[in-house]
């Protein structure tokens, strides 16, 4: 396939018809990875579209290719770029990186003083986040908004999160703090170290996933 031409923009009402296809692909992708994200209904995606809090990528023929949306937590103190998804036939074209950059800029525009965070199991997403200025953090650095954490209940790994008292899970937490001082050499060193070792970090994530899943299976055994 030749490299398609993509148009990436902030969603408007003309994109509401893609909501069902987007949520279906979110569910299928999570199932294929063996992990889960908070399930979202087409109605919820339409709401984000109407609020101007979503980014969509379309081909020059009008086919949806990718999507991501913004959620605000703790009265806007924290923002998450959620539901990043690329249609299978349009993967390997660097589209996720482009969408992520656009939704990040939209988040900065709408919530300039908010911390932007994410939970992910994918090394590729970690690398994208790192280039945008995110750093890996502990779960305690994220929002304590119960509504956000309740969204994890639909994840297949929710029991792991509960067993760890919401302090750890298979996902890796990353955070962008707009108030972090750029001259903070320790913070810059941390970012550069993460960028340089992201592939190694990805292997650690896979190891963590393997360990947690073994624990989960052992806890389900009946004696």
Image: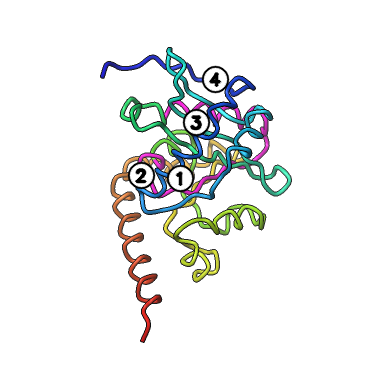
Please tell me the numbered disc located at residue 75.
none
Residue at 49% x, 34% y: name it. Answer: 22
Within 10 angstroms of label 2, few (less than 14), some, or many (20 or more) residues? Answer: some
Quick one: SS at disc 4? strand
Residue at 65% x, 27% y: name it. Answer: 52
Please tell me the numbered disc located at residue 27.
1
Tell whether label 2 touches label 3 (CB within 8 Å): no
Range drawn in magenta: 97-126
Q: Quadrant of the C terminus?
A: bottom left
Quick one: SS at disc 1? helix
Q: Compared with residue 42, is residue 13 higher up or lower down, i.e. above or below?
A: above
Quick one: SS at disc 3? strand
Within 10 angstroms of label 4, few (less than 14), some, or many (20 or more) residues? Answer: some
Q: Quadrant of the N terminus?
A: top left
Q: Is label 3 or label 2 in front? A: 3
Q: Which residue is mark 4?
A: 9
Residue at 54% x, 50% y: name it. Answer: 38
Q: Is label 2 or label 1 in front? A: 1
């Amino acid at each position: 396939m030749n490299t398609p031409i993509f148009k990436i923009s902030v969603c408007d009402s003309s994109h509401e018809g893609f909501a069902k296809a987007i949520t279906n692909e979110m569910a299928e992708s999570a199932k294929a990875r063996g992990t889960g994200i908070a399930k979202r209904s087409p109605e919820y995606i339409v709401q984000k579209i109407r609020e101007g809090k979503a980014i969509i990528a379309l081909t020059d023929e009008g086919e949806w290719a990718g999507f991501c949306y913004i959620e605000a937590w703790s009265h806007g103190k924290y923002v998450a770029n959620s539901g990043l998804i690329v249609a299978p036939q349009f993967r390997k074209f660097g589209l996720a990186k482009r969408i992520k950059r656009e939704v990040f800029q939209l988040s900065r525009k709408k919530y300039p003083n908010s911390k932007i965070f994410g939970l992910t199991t994918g090394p590729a997403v970690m690398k994208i986040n790192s280039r945008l200025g995110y750093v890996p953090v502990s779960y305690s650095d994220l929002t304590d908004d119960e509504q956000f954490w309740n969204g994890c209940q639909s994840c297949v790994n929710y029991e792991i999160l509960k067993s760890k008292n919401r302090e750890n899970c298979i996902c890796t937490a990353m955070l962008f703090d707009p108030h972090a001082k750029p001259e903070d050499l320790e913070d810059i060193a941390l970012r550069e170290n993460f960028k340089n070792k992201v592939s190694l970090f990805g292997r650690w994530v896979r190891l963590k996933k393997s360990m947690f899943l073994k624990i989960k299976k052992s806890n389900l055994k009946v004696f």
